[in-house]
């Protein structure tokens, strides 16, 4: 018997029957199996012995896959470690996609994205977001670390908050290439939510990204105040994005590429990375009852009943991720004891 409370201080796992999982017989598990194949690229010790069978089942029917799940895994309802039942929270995140220029074009593309600057480790915390825009010493140290330039500083902030993104970069010679930016470090400053800053100001009631952008369009003189409310800046590394890799998301904390609609970020003190999870959530943005995989983490994702849903990339994914905020239930699917 698995003793969840001993292994995971933020959660308690209660064994349940497969019939207790809402929508289990209706999910297209074949759609989820690609995420499990990726899971097996870096499996945890508990799941590594199952990977040969997982790969063999990649072409099986959903019924065959569900029968295999029932035979080899035990579902556990996730509860807070205290045992006090509370409602969980599901939010969303995505991989932003923007056009960019390799060289600065004043008035067109003049919002930089940076690689870690030299000397970053020698000063912690490093300069704040406001310093990087106004302080001569900070700007001098950043010179030469620009990866590319975006047209909108708010888009640069969105990409930093998400932690990765796709760029269609126009090179100096006019050619274009697709690239992915992935997380390479921060300036060591604390993260402060710009949306919460707006709420605290009484400026908005809708702190989703669509609501925020509406407010910013009506208040262009407050853009810098909004940006500087979050002193934390993320630095990136650039990677090629060949067509095959473009079919998946960026690597999550587990080190495997994220799968839209099938990867979630969790608190690893509640659910270990690499664990298959049954997720159920119903709300104004989505009705979900599906097999997902705990493949990522996030600074705001803490506690037992907390998950961030990877929506994919592009405008539609960004709209869903920006609005998703609804109750959640979670069940971990753990290997049965031999």
Image (tube, rainbow, N blue to C red):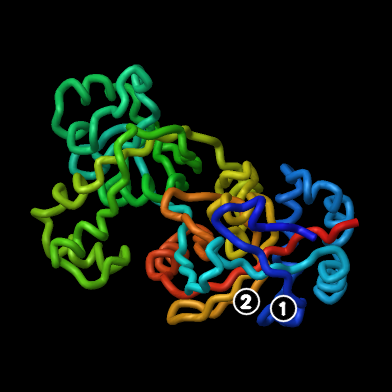
Q: Is residue 146 left or right of residue 55?
A: left
Asked if disc 2 and disc 1 are in contact, CB closer than 8 Å, the reply is: yes
Residue at the spot x=86%, y=67% of the render? 68
Q: Residue at x 84, y 61 (%)?
A: 336
Q: Is residue 39 above or below residue 141?
A: below
Q: Earlier in the sequence, mark 2 or mark 1?
A: 1
Residue drawn at x 20%, y 64% as measured from the top left: 199
Q: Which quarter of the picture shows residue 105?
A: top left
Q: Name above or below for residue 140 compared with residue 225.
A: above
Q: Is residue 277 above or below residue 42?
A: below
The picture places residue 11, in percent across and down from the top left corner, at: 58, 60
Residue 299 in percent (x, y) is at 43, 48
- In the image, which disc is placed on residue 70? none
Q: What residue is at 25 percent from the left and 46 percent from the top?
A: 230
Q: Which mark is residue 289?
A: 2
Which secondary structure lies at badge 1? loop
**Does residue 311 appear anywhere in the picture?**
no
Q: Is 173 positioned to the left or the right of 220 in the image?
A: right
Q: Count neighbours of disc 2 (C-alpha within 10 A) and say few if under 14, some if 14 to 19, many if 20 or more.
A: many
Tell me the SS state at disc 2: strand
Depth check: give the residue in front, 293 or 162: 293
Q: Which residue is mark 1?
A: 24
Do we see residue 142 in this rendering? Answer: yes
Give the class, few, some or many, for how many residues have Cα within 10 Å of label 1's Cα (few <14, many ≥20): some
Q: Quadrant of the C terminus?
A: bottom right
Classify residue 196 by image quadrant. Answer: bottom left
Q: Is residue 49 left or right of residue 33?
A: right
């Amino acid at each position: 018997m698995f003793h969840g409370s001993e292994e995971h201080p933020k959660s308690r796992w209660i064994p349940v029957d497969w019939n207790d999982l809402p929508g289990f017989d209706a999910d297209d598990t074949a759609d989820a199996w690609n995420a499990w194949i990726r899971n097996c690229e870096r499996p945890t010790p508990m799941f590594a012995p199952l990977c040969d069978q997982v790969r063999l089942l990649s072409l099986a029917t959903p019924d065959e896959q569900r029968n295999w799940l029932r035979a080899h895994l035990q579902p556990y309802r996730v509860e807070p470690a205290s045992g006090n039942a509370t409602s969980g929270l599901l939010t969303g995140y995505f991989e932003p996609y923007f056009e960019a220029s390799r060289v600065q074009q004043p008035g067109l593309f003049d919002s930089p994205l940076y690689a870690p600057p030299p000397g970053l480790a020698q000063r912690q915390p490093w300069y704040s977001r406001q310093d990087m825009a106004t302080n001569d010493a900070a700007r001098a140290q950043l010179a030469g670390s620009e990866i590319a330039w975006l047209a909108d500083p708010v888009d640069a902030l969105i990409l930093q908050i998400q932690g990765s993104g796709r760029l269609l970069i126009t090179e100096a010679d006019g050619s274009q290439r697709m690239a992915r930016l992935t997380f390479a470090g921060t300036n060591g400053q604390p993260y402060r939510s710009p949306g919460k800053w707006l709420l605290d100001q009484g400026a908005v009631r809708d702190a989703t990204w669509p609501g925020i952008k509406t407010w910013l369009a009506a208040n262009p003189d407050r853009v810098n105040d909004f940006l500087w409310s979050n002193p934390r800046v993320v630095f990136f590394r650039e990677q090629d994005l060949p067509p095959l890799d473009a079919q998946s998301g960026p690597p999550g904390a587990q080190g495997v590429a994220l799968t839209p609609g099938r990867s979630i970020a969790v608190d690893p003190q509640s659910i270990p990375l690499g664990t298959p999870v049954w997720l159920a959530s119903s709300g104004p943005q989505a009705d979900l009852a599906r097999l997902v995989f705990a493949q990522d983490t996030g600074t705001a994702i803490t506690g037992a009943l907390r998950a961030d849903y990877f929506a994919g990339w592009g405008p539609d994914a960004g709209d869903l991720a920006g609005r998703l905020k609804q109750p959640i239930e979670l069940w971990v699917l753990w290997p049965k004891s031999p």
